[in-house]
Image (cartoon, rainbow, N blue to C red):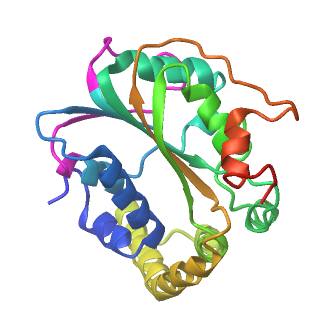
């Protein structure tokens, strides 16, 4: 059913709650793909690749961090997943995404949300389960920063954060469990062939994720109680338009108009 996805990878995805949430959001934003061309940028798990391809259309995948090796106006949709944090010039990269999109093409960006106060990310760094921290050039984006690199060539239609405190807590504990297992597995003597070792690892990971899955479901329910907080993940949906640098208006108190819109109650000048 899903191209280039093994049965083991499919089984692991079925127990990966956060990946399934992300895929639903991508599918909703991207829409029908029949007869359309899509570009997915980032180090994307094969299970997500398979599901994107199963949506229809002609998908291309790359993890380029500078110039995109594609023709102008080649794609109807560009999806950027967990990638901007590793791009040196993110503004220039968004100009590249704009270039390869067709007129009125759609862009979907999913990235780390840069929060002022966090608990789980320092815990991940402490235990060495944060994703590629040494190579990452920035820890994430606020809604304002993401808007700033999009505003000159895109009309931002939606921004949203997701995966709040409880969900991220479960993701952290899951990473710790997987990291502990993989560390123990590497310390064992190699007494099987490579394929058998990989199958053993996949079975253990499936067991860990199966145990964690109902707790992820409960965490998602608890996160609904924290609807007034912002999540650890940030997504944006934008439509391509003519590239024209726009100056961000600054209010008398030094805030940008975007900051005021995001962080001020309508009809007042008071912060939340």
How many numbered marks, from 0 up? 0
Question: Where is residue 177 drawn, in percent x and y?
Answer: 62, 77
**Residue 164 image-quadrant placement:** bottom right
Residue shown at the point (82%, 64%) measured from the top left: 126
- Is residue 221 toward the left or the right of residue 262 in the image? left
63 vs 198: above or below: above
142 vs 27: above or below: above
- Is residue 176 toward the left or the right of residue 256 in the image? left
Based on the picture, tell me whether residue 245 belongs to the magenta stretch.
Answer: no
The rendered magenta stretch, by its main secondary structure, is classed as loop
Question: Where is residue 143 drawn, in percent x and y?
Answer: 64, 43
Looking at the image, which is closer to me, 158 or 38? 158
- Is residue 95 toward the left or the right of residue 250 in the image? left
Based on the picture, tell me whether residue 64 belongs to the magenta stretch.
Answer: yes
Residue 8 makes an appearance in the image: yes
Quarter of the image that includes the C terminus: bottom right
Quarter of the image that includes the N terminus: bottom left
Question: Where is residue 137 drawn, in percent x and y?
Answer: 72, 35
Residue 135 makes an appearance in the image: no
- Is residue 53 toward the left or the right of residue 100 in the image? left
Residue shown at the point (43%, 59%) measured from the top left: 22
**Residue 198 image-quadrant placement:** bottom left
85 vs 24: above or below: above
Please report the bounds of the magenta region as a residue range: 53-75
């Amino acid at each position: 059913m899903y191209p280039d996805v093994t049965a083991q990878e499919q089984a692991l995805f079925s127990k990966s709650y956060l990946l399934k949430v992300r895929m639903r959001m991508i599918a909703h934003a991207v829409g029908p793909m029949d007869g359309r061309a899509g570009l997915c940028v980032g180090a994307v798990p094969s299970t997500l690749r398979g599901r994107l391809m199963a949506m229809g259309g002609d998908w291309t995948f790359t993890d380029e961090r500078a110039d995109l090796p594609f023709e102008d106006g080649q794609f109807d949709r560009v999806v950027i997943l967990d990638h901007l944090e590793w791009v040196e010039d993110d503004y220039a990269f968004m100009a590249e995404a704009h270039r390869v999109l067709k007129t009125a093409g759609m862009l979907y960006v999913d990235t780390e949300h840069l929060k002022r106060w966090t608990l789980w990310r320092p815990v991940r760094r402490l235990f060495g389960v944060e994703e590629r921290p040494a190579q990452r050039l920035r820890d994430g984006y606020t809604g304002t920063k993401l808007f700033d690199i999009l505003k000159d060539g895109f009309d931002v239609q939606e921004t949203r954060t997701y995966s709040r405190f409880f969900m991220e807590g479960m993701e952290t504990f899951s990473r710790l469990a997987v990291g502990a297992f993989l560390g123990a597995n590497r310390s064992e003597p190699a007494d099987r062939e490579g394929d058998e070792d990989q199958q053993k690892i996949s079975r253990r990971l499936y067991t860990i994720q199966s145990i964690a899955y109902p707790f992820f479901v409960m965490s998602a329910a608890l996160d609904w109680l924290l609807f007034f907080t912002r999540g650890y993940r940030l997504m944006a949906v934008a439509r391509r338009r003519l590239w024209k640098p726009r100056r961000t208006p600054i209010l008398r108190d030094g805030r940008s108009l975007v900051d005021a819109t995001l962080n001020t109650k309508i009809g007042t000048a008071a912060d939340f």
